[in-house]
Image: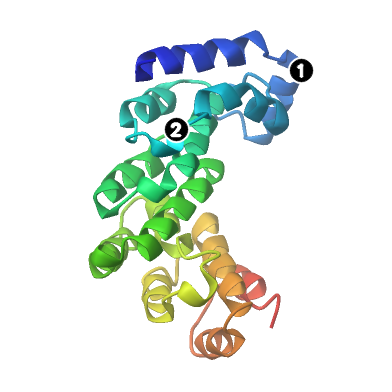
Amino acid sequence: MTPFEKYQAVKKAYADAANEENAQAMGKYMRNLFPFYGLKTPTRRELSRPFLKGVTKEEIAWELVDLCFEDDYREMQYFALDYLKRVEKQLTFSDLPKIKQLAETKSWWDSVDSLVKLVGQVFIRDEENKEKTAALILTWARDPDFWVRRTAIEFQLGLKEATDPELLGKIIDLNLGSQEFFINKAIGWALRDYSKTKPAWVRSYMASRELSPLSRREGSKYI
């Protein structure tokens, strides 16, 4: 099955299972930014299962991902993100510009917060390019698009001991003073997450910085 044929097959499976009542509720929850088929997560994943079978050993089908991100329906972007999760072990430094492009496409917290996990996996798995990855992410932390900056701030979520605190601090420093809710929330989440691993570092960092009330509240939740 070609990427285009798979895209069409997934789209048909989703359309055939569409639920208008759910679609209206889901659209409203997402501020009516995107149309929905109305597929709740368990239903969508069950429908997606045949199309994700065996993909972990295949070359990454970026054409399929692009087709899904060009589609109007939000569930098609969710399929692309589920697909990328399945092939994440194959992602390398060379794929990061593509991930950045996705963060800039139909941007909202639901898609961006899935993409950050892929960046984190590249950071810890592609050891040969770790310094280059860190340098690239620092440029993202200065990007005009705040969704790209949010990706940079959050990309170490869940990395625990593999987190680079110096890099985390630099990225957050570049975004202090922002008036953007999604940036200040991300700063708080990043600090809160790392506080589970290195509470002393987070306490020290927060004590030495002028954080927004939102960032400080989120970041100090567990310390």
Q: Nearer the viewer, residue 9 or 22?
A: 9
Q: Secondary structure at mark 1?
A: helix
Q: Residue 190: give x, y in percent of width and height.
A: 54, 68
Q: Is residue 121 above or below residue 90?
A: below
Rate crowding at label 1 as few (under 14), some (14 to 19) or many (20 or more) other CA atoms within 10 Å: few
Q: Secondary structure at mark 2?
A: helix
- Dot 1 corresponds to which residue? 21
Q: Is residue 57 above or below residue 26?
A: below
Q: Residue at x 32, y 26 (%)?
A: 63
In the picture, the quarter occupied by the C terminus is: bottom right
Q: Is residue 151 above or below residue 32?
A: below
Q: Residue 193: give x, y in percent of width and height.
A: 60, 70
Q: Quadrant of residue 160?
A: bottom right
Amino acid found under the numbered disc labelled 1:
Glu
As drawn, the label of residue 55 is: 2
In the picture, the quarter occupied by the N terminus is: top left
Q: Residue at x 70, y 75 (%)?
A: 221
